[in-house]
Image (cartoon, rainbow, N blue to C red):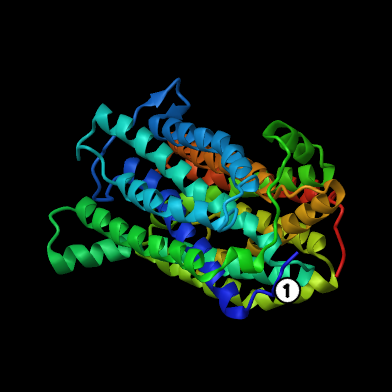
């Protein structure tokens, strides 16, 4: 598929696109609910109403859900636009380039409410800027991921490039998880009047850094030199029908869907696990993320080795099972006569093992599904496949954030924490479901 092999330095540059996108989306995942639905003692003001709707919904759950659903509907349209593009500079990179600035602008605006007191105006503002952020970030990430099967023609190269993607993604998580620590440092060093103001400045700096990261692959990779993908002639409706009729792809999607709901629960709930269930300082959150990243990196070479020996499918199924055990452990945090710090670090280290493979292998597996489909149908639909995947990923993330926010109605404070604990049980069920479904996937094996 390639006119020229992608050099190591270009593979490295490719990872920065994922890192920049990861910083932005994880600022949303890590901070959004905590900022707009803060627990008592957080030092943050109430920006929107905290009351429940129909006894099970809260405003933040509805806002995040509506934004993600609109974004998910947009996915196939940007994918089709990218797949069918005849731009002389390439099908993917020109679109990615155009998306960087709006993604940067709308990401930091999410954390700049119109007023610092509880107001309906903040609700309207958050809905608008969140939708605009999701759409602009999608305009970047769909073409970005569609490059992978074109840049990596063999199975081994797909795993390597997916590994670089994963490294970028987890580094993005690590950067975003430092937001509160950096905010505290800025507040103590530069005399910000409120914690909210310090946090907003931190988000602005992180978004700027993320924008720079996203620009690196745009300027480092010559799409016309390393890719020879042809514009797709298949109409959007037909392309979606072909994609969704791929039975193997459907097994992949259902398992992926369950997994991302579960992971979003962990991401949204980490600060609650630390501060409420274990009554540890909020600043521990970033140390846990760094630990997870470093431990995961230790297992990256193991994942690459085992994927060749036992196959990607078996490794993914085993990872789902191990992650389900981690979720079960969340329910029992703070209940045992064990030091609270040891409890949370043990859980994070255990989670790092399955996350190493689940961060790498899905994109490599999807790239193989796409490659086989291209051969079978003689049509390049890389963007559509990634769009369908990200449609379900975003719905899953929406469910994850919304479900976690809804669980908080049943307890989110010290001594009243049932809602937080129940999220662990849900994660356990979801990971077991993912393992069962993916066990029916038929692995594509070739050189």
In the foreground, 396 or 184: 396
Q: Look at the image and tell me in which quarter the C terminus lies.
A: bottom right
Compared with residue 19, is residue 43 higher up or lower down, i.e. above or below? above
Instruction: Please identify the residue farthest to the top as the structure is shown.
Output: 54
At label 1, counting other C-alpha atoms closer than 10 Å, the crowd grade (few under 14, some 14-19, many 20 or more) is some
Does 175 sit above or below residue 109? below
Give coordinates of residue 78: x percent, y percent: 56, 42
Q: Position of residue 228 (x, y in %)?
A: 70, 61
Query: How many marks on residues?
Result: 1
- Residue 2, compared with residue 419, is above or below; it is below
Please name the residue shown 63% across and 78% down the image: 7
Q: Nearer the viewer, residue 200 or 85?
A: 85
Percent across and percent down for residue 398 are 53, 39
Residue 354 position within the rendered picture, expressed as x and y whole percent measured from the top left: 67, 64
Q: Secondary structure at mark 1?
A: helix
Whether residue 66 sits left or right of residue 145 in the image: it is left
Q: Residue furthest front?
A: 88
Q: Residue at x 36, y 64 (%)?
A: 209
User: As drawn, is 177 to the left or to the right of 303?
Assistant: left
Q: Quadrant of residue 1?
A: bottom right
Query: In the rendered view, does 145 fall on the left or right side of 220?
Result: right
* Residue 443 seen anywhere in this rendered image of the structure: yes
- Front residue of 130/339: it is 130
**Residue nearest the observer in this picture, 26 or 272:** 26
Question: Would you say residue 49 is visible in this rendering?
Answer: no
Residue wearing tag 1: 304
Q: Where 198 falls versus 423 (above or below)?
A: below
Point 72% across, 67% down: residue: 2
């Amino acid at each position: 598929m390639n006119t020229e092999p992608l050099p190591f330095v270009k593979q490295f540059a490719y990872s920065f696109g994922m890192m920049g996108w990861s910083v932005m989306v994880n600022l949303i995942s890590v901070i959004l609910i905590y900022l707009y639905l803060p627990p008592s003692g957080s030092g943050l003001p109430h920006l929107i109403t905290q009351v429940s709707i129909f006894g099970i919904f809260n405003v933040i759950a509805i806002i995040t859900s509506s934004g993600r659903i609109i974004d998910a509907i947009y996915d196939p349209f940007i994918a089709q636009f990218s797949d069918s593009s005849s731009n002389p500079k390439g099908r993917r990179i020109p679109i990615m380039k155009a998306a960087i600035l709006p993604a940067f602008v709308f990401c930091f605006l999410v954390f700049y409410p119109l007023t610092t007191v509880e107001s309906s105006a903040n609700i309207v503002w958050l809905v608008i800027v969140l939708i605009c952020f999701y759409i602009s970030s999608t305009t970047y990430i769909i073409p970005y991921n569609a490059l992978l099967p074109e840049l990596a023609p063999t199975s081994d190269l797909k795993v390597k490039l997916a590994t670089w993607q994963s490294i970028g993604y987890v580094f993005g998580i690590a950067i975003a998880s430092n937001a509160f620590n950096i905010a505290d440092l800025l507040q103590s060093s530069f005399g910000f009047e409120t914690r909210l103001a310090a946090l907003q400045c931190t988000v602005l700096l992180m978004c700027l850094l993320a924008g720079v990261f996203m620009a690196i692959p745009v300027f480092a990779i010559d799409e016309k030199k390393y890719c020879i993908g042809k514009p797709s002639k298949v109409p959007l409706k037909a392309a979606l029908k072909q994609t969704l009729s791929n039975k193997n792809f459907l097994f992949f999607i259902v398992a992926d869907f369950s997994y991302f709901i579960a992971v979003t629960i962990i991401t949204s709930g980490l600060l609650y696990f630390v501060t409420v269930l274990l009554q540890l300082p909020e600043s521990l959150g970033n140390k846990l993320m760094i630990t997870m990243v470093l431990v995961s990196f230790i297992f990256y070479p193991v994942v690459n080795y085992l994927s060749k020996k036992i196959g990607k499918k078996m490794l993914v199924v085993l990872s789902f099972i191990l992650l389900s055990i981690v979720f079960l452990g969340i329910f029992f945090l703070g209940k045992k006569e064990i030091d609270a710090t040891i409890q949370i670090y043990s859980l994070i280290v255990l989670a790092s093992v399955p996350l190493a493979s689940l961060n790498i292998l899905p994109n490599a597996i999807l790239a193989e599904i796409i490659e086989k489909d291209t051969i079978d149908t003689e049509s390049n639909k890389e963007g559509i496949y990634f769009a369908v995947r990200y449609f379900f990923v975003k719905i899953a993330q929406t469910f994850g954030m919304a479900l976690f926010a809804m669980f908080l109605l049943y307890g989110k404070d010290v001594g009243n924490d049932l809602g937080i604990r129940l999220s662990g049980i849900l994660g356990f069920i979801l990971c077991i479901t993912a393992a069962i479904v993916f066990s029916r996937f038929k692995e594509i094996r070739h050189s």
